[in-house]
Image (cartoon, rainbow, N blue to C red):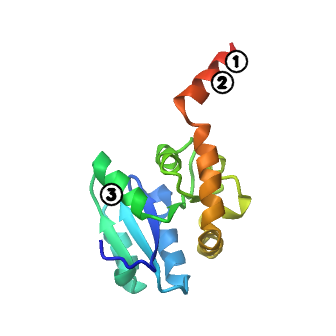
Amino acid sequence: YDFSDKDKILLFFGNIRDYKGLDILLISLSEIKDKNVKLIIAGKPWENFGKYQNIINNLKLNNKIQSHLEFNSNEKVAELFKLSDLIIYPYSEFEASSGAGAVALNFEKPVVVTNVGGLPELVKDKNIIAEPNNPEDLKNKINYALKNLKRLKKDSKEIAKQYLWKEIAEKTLGVY
């Protein structure tokens, strides 16, 4: 990976599909003034990646992005999450909870999410929940998160405890 110690690494992780908002994230990234903010795109495209590559080219983002457009092994996933400072889930629509979001929490990484489906459940600080399809709002939430990484990391560690099998089992038993 070609990053410096000063770089702040954002990660977009998971299968690349229209509803996951990568186009919105790319527009937001182009508006972030900090030259040290970089993005890793890691996941298998479900459609032609050309439309995203066109956005990257048109917004002159090639020097800020590294792409890993394939299914990533568990070892590679661990490497990517450890390298990253902030995970971004800019979904435009979503009706469930995110498996990829739970992975981020397991690595105790803060996430910026959009206000769709179960994604807001992944964060404690509501200042990192962006409105879907809103590049300006997403940019603001990313900037806020980058200024508050230490505290947000603690929040993610706390939320991750809710997703441990022991916690889930105890909650399930409590229902019965």
Can residue 113 be seen here? The reply is no
Question: Which amino acid does the dot numbered 2 rest on?
Answer: Lys
Label 2 Cα crowd, 10 Å radius (few <14 / some 14-19 / many 20+) = few
| Residue at horizontal 29 percent and vertical 61 percent from the top | 69
Is 85 on the left or on the right of 160, as rendered? left
Name the residue beneath numbered marker 2. 171
> CB of mark 1 within 8 Å of CB of mark 2?
yes
Residue 68, placed above or below residue 53: above
- Taking depth in this image into account, of 54 and 88 the one nearest to the observer is 88
**x and y, in percent, of residue 96 in the image:** 57, 41
Q: Is residue 121 left or right of residue 24?
A: right
Quadrant including the C terminus = top right
Residue at 53% x, 52% y is 108
- Say which label, 3 or 2, has the lower sequence index: 3
* Residue shown at the point (47%, 82%) measured from the top left: 36
**Can residue 19 be seen in the rendering of this structure?**
yes
Mark 1 sits on what residue? Answer: 175
Report the quarter where the N terminus lies: bottom left
Marks 3 & 2, CB-CB < 8 Å contact:
no
From the top left corner, tell me how far across and down residue 124 is, in percent. 70, 52
Amino acid type, label 3 = Pro
Q: Secondary structure at mark 1?
A: helix
Residue 118 is situated, as x and y percent measured from the top left of the image, at: 62, 45
Q: Secondary structure at mark 3?
A: loop
Q: CA distance from mark 3 to mark 2?
A: 36 Å
Q: Nearer the viewer, mark 3 or mark 2?
A: 2
Q: Residue furthest top?
A: 176
**Residue to which mark 3 is pinned:** 45
